[in-house]
Amino acid sequence: MGVNWLVVGLSVSAALAFAVSTTLKKASASQVPKISGSGVRGVGGFLGRTVSHPLWLGGLLADGAGLALQVTALHLGALAVVQPLLVSGLLFALVLRHRHDWVISAQEVLWAGVLVSCLIAFLALSGSVSNSAQPSSADHLPAALAALAGVLTAGLCLSIARRRVPAGTRAALIGVAVGAVFAGTAALIKAATNVLTLHGPWAVLSSWQLYAVLALGGIGLVLTQLAFQAGPLTASLPAISTVDPLLSVAIGVLVYDEHLRRGPLSGTVLLALLLLLALAVIQLGKLESAEHIDTAVAAAR
């Protein structure tokens, strides 16, 4: 089975759009006043200020473009491939972060190279690089169990994050919840596009998958902003960027019967690649956080 380069191109383009969106939303989160209080009123005030902020609205437009590209990629390709490829958005975020000075450190180049190498190797070794001509249907029992596990994981993380925990821990916990929501949203998007192909537009408009996508998408937007404000980016971004692809691979295999290349050696190598990919994401997040701290110190002098 050869690489579906159209799916790869769509996924990478979606990653670029999401990187632009994340950059704008991070800037918005730093300008919008923090939540005053932990109740519904405080969250409501935060949401009102956020949705009227120009940078957040620009990020929302970029999100729309990225979502359209992601939907098409998920329809044509495998969930276990599209979602890991979206991690390439970190590379675009790296470029956007240095768009003024174009000075990228040796460590950033190193970990960016590791990330690219992991993605290329994953594509080459996974054997799950394109779907069959017919859209696949989700196995209902594994799908229900995966959805329940994702909801419980996200709920548990958010419940712990509400307690008195360090800012970094709170941001990481919310980031895990965001990653679970993103993976679940991608799985539902794939299910909705399959309904569209098999039964037509009227069927998808009356399907629960479409409205579940809209609901989870809205929840994901809110949780992302909360994660950015809860603590340092080095805690939230790695959590989001690792949980999403890892959980998506599991959902693709268990729910959609997407076949990764089997065998003890191939499985071990693929697992090692995913773990190395997660390490590269974490290191890039730490470097970005350190740069923000250095900039703030320099400005204070």
Image (cartoon, grey):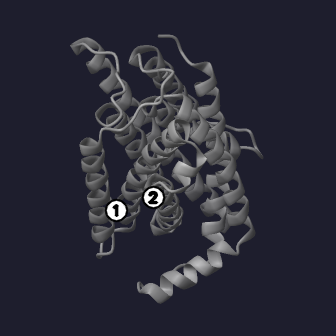
Q: Quadrant of the C terminus?
A: bottom right
Q: Residue at x 44, y 48 (%)?
A: 188
Q: Are marks 2 and 1 in contact (CB under 8 Å)?
A: no
Q: Is residue 101 left or right of residue 195?
A: right
Residue 181 lies in quadrant: bottom left
Task: Let me know if residue 33 appears in the view.
Answer: no
Q: Is residue 19 left or right of residue 248?
A: right
Query: How far across and down, in percent of the image, does residue 218 sit?
Result: 52, 64
Query: How far across and down, in percent of the image, does residue 160 sit?
Result: 27, 68
N-terminal label among 2 and 1: 1
Q: CA distance from mark 2 to mark 1?
A: 29 Å
Q: Which mark is residue 212?
A: 2
Q: Which mark is residue 22?
A: none
The residue carrying mark 1 is 169
Query: How far across and down, in percent of the image, does residue 274 sit?
Result: 37, 30
* Residue lying furthest right: 100
Q: Is residue 90 left or right of residue 161?
A: right
Query: How far across and down, in percent of the image, does residue 119 sit?
Result: 49, 25
Residue 11 lies in quadrant: top right
Name which residue type carries label 1: Thr
Vertical order, 171 against 52 (above or below): above
Q: Residue at x 27, y 19 (%)?
A: 267
Of 280 and 49, which appears nearest the observer?
A: 49
For numbered disc 1, what is the local secondary structure?
Answer: helix
Task: Let me know if residue 167 appears in the view.
Answer: yes
Q: Residue at x 45, y 53 (%)?
A: 209
Vertical order, 86 against 178 (above or below): above
